[in-house]
Image: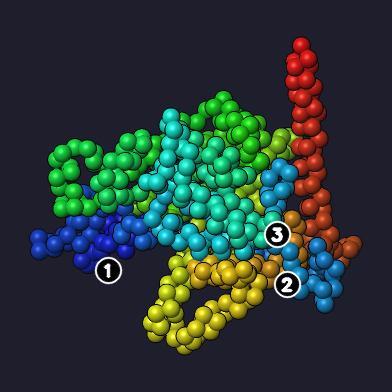
Amino acid sequence: MSFSKPNASIATRTKNRTPNDRTHASGMCSVCVDECPGLCEIGKSAFRAAENLYPQPFGTITAGADKEYPVDFSHLNIMGTAVGALGIEDDSDRAIFENVNTETRLGKDKGIKLKLPIMIPGLGSTKVAKTHWDGLAVGSAISGTALTIGENVGGMDPNSKFEKGKITYCPDLEYRVKTFKDWQQDGYGMIVMQENVEDSRLGILDYGINKLGVEAVEMKWGQGAKDIGGEVKIDNLEKARMLRDRGYIVLPDPYEEAVASVFGKSFKEFERHSRVGMVTEEGFVKRVEELRKMGAKYVFLKTGAYRPADLARAVYFSSIAGVDVLTVDGAGGGTGMSPWHMMNEWGVPTLYISALTYNYVHKLASKGKHVPDVILAGGFAFEDDMFKALALGAPYVKAVGMARPPMCAAHVGKLLGEQIKKNEIDRTIEPYGKKMDEIFVLASKVERLFNTNGRTVPPGAIGVYSYYQRLSQGLRQLMCGARKFALPYLTRDDVVCLTREAAEVTGLKYIMDADAEEAEKILSGKGRTKTAKTKSKAKAKASAKVQAKAKTKTAPKKAAGKAKAKAKKRK
C-alpha cells in the first residue's frame, strides 16, 4: 500500500481528473488526456512552476501533512484501572476527575508554571500568525499556558530600527510580548522568544531580554514541517527589497530589472527564505553561555525531525550546556509555508522521534547526567494525544507542543466574533444563538474572570480558552480513569500498543503482554495483588531515584567548577 497521496491535494489546490482511477506511485490519472487543462500538481506546475511547491493561498491558511505513517499515536491505547488512586485519597467521593491536577513545571529550577501542559512552539513572521496573535497570546495567557514568538519577526517588521546591524527597536516584537504579559495571570504561563540564523545576526534575543524583559529564549535548529529555514511570501516589491537589504534570501531577485518589470503580472509574490544553521558542540555551548550572560533565565532548544544522530546531538548538547527545555518536533506537523511534498516526505514521524527522544534522554539520566525537560510536538490536537505523549515520555516529557489546533480555535473565535458584531451569523451556528454569551458557552465565565479595567478578552482568545478548557477536562477524565490525579504520576505503563510493530518502535508493552505477570498472580491466588497505587508509587520512586542520582552526580562537578573559578580569580 502507498502511505502518500501525491499529485493532488486541497493544500495545493490541485485534483485528479479521474480521482478514483489513478496510479498510486505517481498520483497521475491512469489515463492522461490532451484535453485536460492541468488540474493536478504536474499540470499546474506546467504553468505556475515553483509557485506550486507550497500550500495555497499563503497567509490565510495553515497546513499539515496528510501522509499516513506505518505507526502513529493511534496505535497506542490508554490503560484505565478499577483499583486505587495516586495523588489523592482512594475514596470515591474524592477521586473524581474535577480533582485531577493538570499543572506542570518546566526549567532547571521548575520556575515555569503551566496550568495545562501546552506550549505553542513557535509562531513567527507568517501573516496568519500576526493576524491571530491577539487571540493566541491572550488565550494562552488567561489559560496559564506557554507561547513562543517564532523566527524572523524582528527582521520582517518594516518599522524595526537598527544600529550597526543590530536591532534597537521593533514594534511588532514589543506588541507581541506586551499582549501576553498584560493578560498573564498569577505568574502562570510563559512567553518565549526564538532565534534562527538571521535573528542571531540581528541581535533579536539580546533586544528581547534587555529591552522587552523576556525571561525565556529559544535557539531554533528546525521544525517538523521542513528541513530548511523559515519561509514566507511577500506581495510588495519595496518590502522584498528591504528584506534583501537586511540579509534575507529573496527569490526572485527584487533588484533585477526584468523581475521588477513583471512583478504584479506573471507573478504576484516573492519568496523570502532563511538560512540553515551549522551546528557545532562548541558553538552551541558558547551560545547558551552568551544567552545566560545577557540575562536569560531560561534557555530552550527546539529541534526538528532530523535524522536520529541529530536528535542525539540535541539531547547531548542540551545536557552538557545545561539547557532548561528541549522541544522535539516530529515530521508531519506544520503551520506556515512549508513545501508540500517536503512536509509529507521528509524526516522522522512524531511517534518514532518521540520514542527515540525517550531512549536518548533516559540513557543520559541513567548515567547521572543533566537532562532538560522535554516538550513533544508534531500533530497533537486532543486530550488523548496529550496523555499518550506524556505517558510515553514519562518522567521526562512535561508538556506537548501544539500550533495548528490553537490557531484554528483562534481563527474560529475571531470569525464568530466578527459575524456577531455584523449580525451575520452563519446558518450552521444560528441554532446556538446570535449573541456572544449564547454562542460561546464560556463567554460569561471569561467576562467574569478576566474582563477588568475596561479590557475585554477578544473573541479569538475566547476561542483558544474554550478549546483549552475542553482539553483540560478531557485530560482530567482520562487521568481519573487511569487513577492518576497529577501529571507526575503518569508512567509508561499507562499506555500499551495495539500492534507488535508499535511495541517494537516504542518499547512499550504489546496489549496482550501487558500486566501478564500480575494477572497470573491474581488468577493463581498467590499473595496480595498490586493496586494501581502501589504500582505507580514504585514507578514514581524509580523515576525519582534516576533524577536524584543525576542531581547528586552533577552537584559535586558544579561545586568543583565554582571552586576552580574562584581560585583562578584569586590568582
Kindly identify the residue that appears in the image at 58 percent across and 27 percent down: 286
Q: Position of residue 303 (x, y in %)?
A: 52, 42
Q: Are marks 3 and 2 in contact (CB under 8 Å)?
A: no
Q: Amino acid at mark 3?
A: Asp
Q: Secondary structure at mark 1?
A: loop
Q: Amino acid at mark 2?
A: Phe
**Residue annotated with mark 3:** 186
**Residue annotated with mark 2:** 97
In this view of the protein, can residue 558 be seen by the observer? Answer: yes
Image quarter in which the N terminus is found: bottom left
Res 509 quadrant in image? bottom right
Q: Position of residue 138 (x, y in %)?
A: 56, 62
Q: Residues within 10 Å of mark 1 (few under 14, many from 20)?
A: few
Q: Nearer the viewer, residue 359 or 271?
A: 271
**Residue annotated with mark 1:** 20
Res 422 quadrant in image? bottom left
Q: Residues within 10 Å of mark 2 (few under 14, many from 20)?
A: some
Q: Residues within 10 Å of mark 3 (few under 14, many from 20)?
A: few
What whole-number distance in Å separates the C-alpha atoms at marks 3 and 2?
Answer: 24 Å
Q: Position of residue 434 (x, y in %)?
A: 47, 85
Q: Earlier in the sequence, mark 3 or mark 1?
A: 1
Q: Secondary structure at mark 2?
A: helix
What whole-number distance in Å separates the C-alpha atoms at marks 2 and 1?
Answer: 47 Å
